[in-house]
């Protein structure tokens, strides 16, 4: 019999659920420890953070510092900064992981999958064959590297990139 070990999953299962009113994306940058928060880059108005429950290895979220639930709530400067952070995240993933493709997008509103009421963009690196039967049949994602190892890999690659592209 084969065994599949998804050790990261228990952290998600046992994690206490916050009462409504908290804002995880406002709390992460205030922690004062980017490694613990998994923040890999900060720009003046937004930041990149590793998704703790990723669709794929290296899945990043681009998040504005100021809480907003829709793109229309951001100023033109905030929207431009967020887009620059998305582009930086894509280039960072290219430098660190050499993916062949990307899925980049927003989930705006609960019906679209926007379960956290703070605007954020997903930047998901993709490779040929990275999707298989496990999520469909087994309801399980298989990730090849821990979040901590991925954090170090991305922050090392960030040293080779200009702070803004």
Image (cartoon, rainbow, N blue to C red):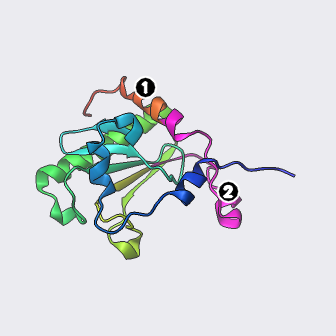
Q: Decide which of 18, 38 is in the foreground and name it.
A: 18
Q: Which residue is mark 2?
A: 132
- Side (left or right) of 112 relative to 58: left
Q: Is residue 100 above or below residue 149?
A: below
- Which span is picked out in magenta? 124-150
Q: Which residue is mark 1?
A: 156
How far across and how far down the image is residue 18, in percent?
38, 63
- Side (left or right) of 52 relative to 66: right
- Side (left or right) of 47 relative to 4: left
Q: Is residue 17 visible?
A: yes
Q: Secondary structure at mark 1?
A: helix
Q: Residue at x 18, y 49 (%)?
A: 80
Q: Residue at x 34, y 27 (%)?
A: 161
Q: Residue at x 18, y 40 (%)?
A: 44
Give the crowd class for mark 2: few <14, some 14-19, many >=20 residues within 10 Å: few
Q: CA distance from mark 2 to mark 1?
A: 29 Å
Which mark, residue 39? none
How far across and how far down the image is residue 63, in percent?
29, 51
Q: Where, quadrant-wise, is the C terminus in this rendering?
A: top left
Q: Earlier in the sequence, mark 2 or mark 1?
A: 2
Give the crowd class for mark 1: few <14, some 14-19, many >=20 residues within 10 Å: some
């Amino acid at each position: 019999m084969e065994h599949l070990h998804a050790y990261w999953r228990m952290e998600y299962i046992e994690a206490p659920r916050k009462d409504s009113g908290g804002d995880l994306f406002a709390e992460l940058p205030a922690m004062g420890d980017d490694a613990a928060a998994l923040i890999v880059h900060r720009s003046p108005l937004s930041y990149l953070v590793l998704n703790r429950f990723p669709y794929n290895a290296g899945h990043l979220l681009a998040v504005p510092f100021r809480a907003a639930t829709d793109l229309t709530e951001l100023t033109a400067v905030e929207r431009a900064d967020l887009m620059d952070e998305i582009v930086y995240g894509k280039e960072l993933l290219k430098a660190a992981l050499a993916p062949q493709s990307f899925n980049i997008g927003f989930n705006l509103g609960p019906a679209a999958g926007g379960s956290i009421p703070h605007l954020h963009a997903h930047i998901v690196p993709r490779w040929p064959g990275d999707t298989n039967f496990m999520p469909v049949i087994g309801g399980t994602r298989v990730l090849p590297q821990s979040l901590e190892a991925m954090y170090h890999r991305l922050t090392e690659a960030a040293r080779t990139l200009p702070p803004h592209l």
